[in-house]
Image (spheres, helix red, strand yellow):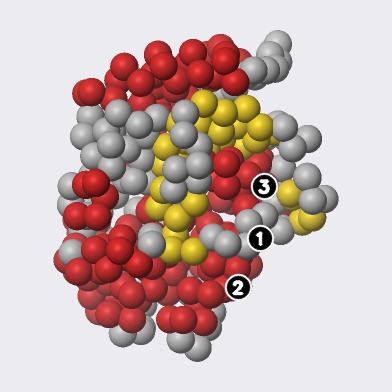
Amino acid sequence: MVVILPCQSNEELNALVMEAKKQTKHGKVADYIPALMKANRDDLSVAIYHQDGNCYSAGDIEQKITLQSISKVLTLALALMDCGEDGVFQKVGYEPTGDPFNSIIKLETNRSAKPLNPMINAGALAVTHLIKGESVEERLQRILEFIRDLAGHSEISYSKEVATSEFETAYLNRSLSYYMKQDGIIDEDVEQLLDLYTKQCAIEMDCLDLSKIGLVFAMDGIDPVREKRIIPAEVARLCKTFMVTCGMYNASGEFAVRVGIPAKSGVSGGIMGSIRNRFGIGIFGPSLDQQGNSIGGVKLLKMMSEKYNLSIF
């Protein structure tokens, strides 16, 4: 395969963004979390962070976005480091699902309430339950410190407005949690777990931070700019595998065929991508398709994958 160097100028990347931006009119911003409804549907920005520290970008890459489901990859990495692979996968499975990310049906129809994978809401709740700490505050601080280390940015925090908005409307996530508590998948107070989980999802950063985190996963757990290992290589491999099989909600199969890179999306419109041994990608485009993925972001990644031969397949 011929390897083509990607995006050697901001102007080149901007041209791709402007083309992908035409798709934003066909989607809509998330409306089931009231605080996310304030986003501008037409926004689209991207940062590509290379292992030598060079960054190419287009759009308003300094605009803050909340991680939402992108946080599931990061808490999975921390839980694996806390509990080991056996400890995590006693609580959650490995398998993709064709159901929506917030569906309860598999918890009802499976023999136990063990979630199919860590990227659906039920699985992510089970993973967050495993994060070590004596209180919500201590566990949240551990998550924040880990994410700050991944991004190399000590000021990263969470949006209290978004966290409160999510907590107050987390009816489905409460139902998922009670189902799992009934079968012993979780054993803590549901309101306590929801408090931590909604704050985790409300952690905010910009596209540059997101691309830096994507680079750490691309480099198998090492920040090459600081020459620092942050995640064990096997943990990074497991996380990237779930990004490929489950990272784009129930559109993950089509995304793997058409784009073919490890990526994780969130309903705020963020997408984090990792191109192994090359670079990380951070995207923000709040106009969503029917599966909850950034419609402009997916189009942009498809064009980039075709233009620069990025698919891992």
Question: How many residues crowd around disc 1 within 10 Å: few (fewer than 14), some, or many (20 or more)?
Answer: some
Q: Earlier in the sequence, mark 3 or mark 1?
A: 1
Mark 3 or mark 1, which is nearer to you?
A: 1
Query: Please, what secondary structure does the residue beneath circle 3 have?
Result: helix
CA distance for labels 3 and 1: 10 Å
Mark 2 or mark 1, which is nearer to you?
A: 1
Query: Please, what secondary structure does the residue beneath circle 2 have?
Result: helix
Quarter of the image for residue 17 reads top left
Residue carrying label 3? 216
Q: Earlier in the sequence, mark 2 or mark 1?
A: 2
Where's residue 105, x and y in %? 19, 55
Where's residue 72, x and y in %? 45, 56
Residue carrying label 1? 149
Mark 2 or mark 3, which is nearer to you?
A: 3
Asked if residue 89 lies left or right of residue 65, the reply is: right
Looking at the image, which residue is at 37% across and 46% down?
Answer: 266
Of residues 142 and 54, the one drawn nearer to the viewer in this rendering: 54
Q: Amino acid at mark 1?
A: Asp
Q: Amino acid at mark 3?
A: Val
Look at the image and tell me in which quarter the C terminus lies.
top right
Hey, which residue is sitting farthest right in the picture?
Answer: 227
Look at the image and tell me in which quarter the N terminus lies.
top right
